[in-house]
Amino acid sequence: MFHANPLHDLALPPRRQFLQQAGLGFGSLALASMLHGETNAAPTPNADPLALRSPHFPAKIKSIIWLFMTGAPSQVDTWDYKPELQKRDGQDLAGSDPKTGFFTTSGKCLKSPFEWKQHGESGSWVSGIFPHLSRHVDKMCFLHSMHLKQNNHAPASIELMCGTNRPGLPALGAWMTYGLGSLNQDLPSYVVLHDTRPRGDDQIWSAGFLPKTYQALSLDARRKEAVDNLARDAKHSDAQQRSQLDLIRQLNQQHAAARPTQADLAARINSYELAYRMQMSAPEALDLSKESEATHKLYGMDQPECATFARQCLLSRRLVERGVRFVQIFAGKGVGGDGSVNDVPWDCHTDVEINHKSCGLHTDQPAAALLADLEARGMLDSTLVIWGGEFGRTSDSQGSKGRDHNPNGFTIWMAGAGVKGGFHYGATDEFGYKAVTNKVHVNDLHATLLHLLGLEHTKLTYRFNGRDYRLTDVAGNLITDILT
């Protein structure tokens, strides 16, 4: 006998629609469960993406200032003294590969043309191109065994900042802002200062697949009006502009309410509000006339050879002072071996002596002043300063006086909160050619920097195209020996 189905008269959705809706529901429950278990949950769609969030564990630093020495300084002419290289100038370099760099090298040892001396209680060896920074070696933690894969400027810079050289991935500063939010709702959390734009430019500080709220604000520090289109249109009063933005926000929120899964909508809404707030905060933060004449002289702003980098360093202190989490300065133009202006300043293919002397004059005093200024203000207790380029230089010559690119061993130093001062970690071989002891890959460096910020690098993830991504990809080891 046929029995009537009590569900027969109900308006049930088609099978495919039912499965889609059910899948979304189960997925939402799973997502909520995962986020509930995280101490550093990512912002939910249409929430304020820059809201301050708790770290995974207590942080040792609040901010990072990265002094990016564009063009790649030679480790054996700056911080990694090699007596054996000095003794064997012109002799064959054992194990050298003429194709290590971007061009071809001679295979003959090239000694450093600079005078080296030991400084500080740590007795750290420093090249003569750094008379100011050499006074601060006891604050510095040297990583002498950095290495990466790429051997040209743009891909190496992307690898150094994004963990791998694939374009489209988020940079360190974007990950920091995504994980921790902003300390100041009136300024961006991530700021880049540059003179000439480095090779690879926007890719080096990209937010990649993260919401664009986490993109860096890029500023040309040479310009008085460093932020384009910041000033309000003179035809509108503040009240008129506020009313206009309120209407736009209301319309955007209505649009977003009907699309709760589209996280980028919150970023767009927030960008309008941040731009409005920046009209009041940014001009004050970027106004160096508020600094004393003594401070200007400390940084070297009265000296043409380093005035631009001095301005960048002083701006970075003012920005961090006002809650910017990550400031990255890209060193500007230098002088090539033939005396010409070089838009990749530390790039010493022709004559390392002429090039590095010029770059030292450009960066030494401002960088030293930044360390001294941060320390005097008590800010070095919460700020980490990083100095380094995208790779190192060959120990054998390119031509007769130059050095080619070398990704196999180079030095980066850090100074400030969370790391040991006057400390040397890792080593290159006796010629400074390759990292051989306690080798540090960029993934290890990133894992350590995130740790200092209170973030466990394996937990800071973002799902994109069906995969969980992180800054350190599937690698990265904490460098515990350098931590205080």
Image (tube, rainbow, N blue to C red):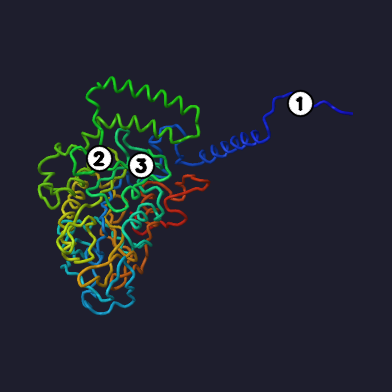
Please tell me in which quadrant of the rendered image residue 54 appears: top left
- Mark yes or no: residue 416 visible: no
Q: Is residue 129 left or right of residue 388?
A: left
**Count of numbered labels shown in the rendering:** 3
Q: From the viewer's perspective, is 153 left or right of 78? A: right
Q: Is residue 243 above or below residue 391?
A: above
Residue 400 relative to residue 270: left or right: left
* Quarter where residue 82 is shown: bottom left
Q: Are marks 1 and 3 in contact (CB under 8 Å)?
A: no
Screen quadrant of the C terminus = bottom left
Q: Is residue 260 visible?
A: yes
Using a 10 Å C-alpha cutoff, classify the residue at mark 1 as few (fewer than 14 neighbours), some (14 to 19) or many (20 or more).
few
Q: Residues within 10 Å of mark 2 (few under 14, many from 20)?
A: some
Q: Residue furthest right?
A: 1
Q: Residue at x 76, y 26 (%)?
A: 8
Q: Nearer the viewer, mark 1 or mark 2?
A: 1
Q: Amino acid at mark 3?
A: Gln
The foreground one among 398 and 394 is 398
Quickly name the residue at label 2.
Answer: 321
Sooner in the amino-acid sequence: mark 2 or mark 3: 3
- Which secondary structure, mark 1? loop
**Residue identified by numbered label 1:** 8
The picture places residue 143, in percent across and down from the top left corner, at: 31, 61
At 38% from the left and 24% from the top, the residue drawn is: 248
Expressed as whole percent of the image width and height from the top left, the position of residue 330 reads 25, 51
Q: The N terminus lies in which quarter of the figure?
A: top right
Image location of residue 470, percent across then percent down: 45, 49
Q: Nearer the viewer, residue 198 or 125?
A: 198
Point out which mark residue 215 bears: 3
In the image, what residue type sits under mark 1? Answer: His
Q: What kind of element bears circle 3? A: loop
